[in-house]
Amino acid sequence: MVRRVFFSFHYERDIWRAGQVRNSWVTKDRESAGFVDAASWEAIKKQGDEAIKRWVNNQLDGTSVTVVLIGKETSSRDWVRYEIVKSHEKGNGLLGIYIHNLKDANSKTDEKGDNHFGEIGKDSNGNSIYFGQLYPTYDWVADDGYHKMGDWIEEAAQKAGR
């Protein structure tokens, strides 16, 4: 089954690394969402928070899985957290992929980021739910993401009943 996947990441810091992951996905005849060029992103940001929310919500429409690309500072990004919460509420399958071992535009790797994005929801007893409690994380380099990401995405979709 063809999956349309939303990629969530820290745009300013990790676009180069995220692009490598995205390109490996779409070169295998798959669809992605959550990517926009720098000029378009700046135009969206200038319109304010409501415009960003609309853009995120529109990008999530029609997706069945959200992949959070985790770099050094990703867990501190409000918009990444928003994307995770919306994906969780929508019932998307979710997973995290650490991308710190991928090289950036200057051929540098980075420090590993945290997968604690704060509370993303509540369970039926009112207890807080956190990303790391429900969703698996992988390392793009150490876990051979180039060859295995499709399997990870399919597992996340199946787990979510999508």
Image: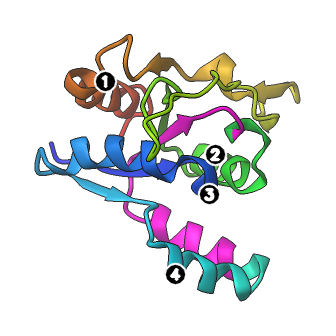
- How far, Cα to Cα, is label 4 from label 3? 12 Å
Q: Name the front one of labels 1 and 4.
A: 4
**In the rendered image, which residue does mark 1 sit on?**
145
Examine the rendered structure and indicate whether residue 112 appears above or below residue 82: above
- How far, Cα to Cα, is label 3 from label 1? 22 Å
Q: Amino acid at mark 4?
A: Ala
Q: Which mark is residue 39?
A: 4
- Residue found at x 69% / y 78%: 45
Label 1 environment density (alpha carbons within 10 Å; few <14, some 14–19, many ≥20): many
Q: Secondary structure at mark 4?
A: helix
Instruction: Name the image colouring.
Output: rainbow
Q: Which mark is residue 94?
A: none
Examine the rendered structure and indicate whether residue 77 appears above or below residue 39: above
Residue 149 left/right relative to 86: left
Q: Position of residue 122 (x, y in %)?
A: 80, 34
Indicate which disc, 3 or 2, sits on the residue closer to the N terminus. 3
Examine the rendered structure and indicate whether residue 65 appears above or below residue 57: above
Q: Amino acid at mark 3?
A: Glu
Q: Amino acid at mark 1?
A: Gly
Residue lying farthest to the front in this orientation: 106
**In the rendered image, which residue does mark 3 sit on?**
12
- The reply to whether dot 4 and dot 2 touch (C-beta < 8 Å) is no
Indicate which disc, 3 or 1, sits on the residue closer to the N terminus. 3
Indicate which disc, 4 or 2, sits on the residue closer to the N terminus. 4
Q: Amino acid at mark 2?
A: Ile
Residue lying farthest to the right in this orientation: 126
In the image, the segment drawn in magenta is: 51-73
Q: Which mark is residue 84?
A: 2
Q: Nearer the viewer, residue 2 or 145?
A: 145
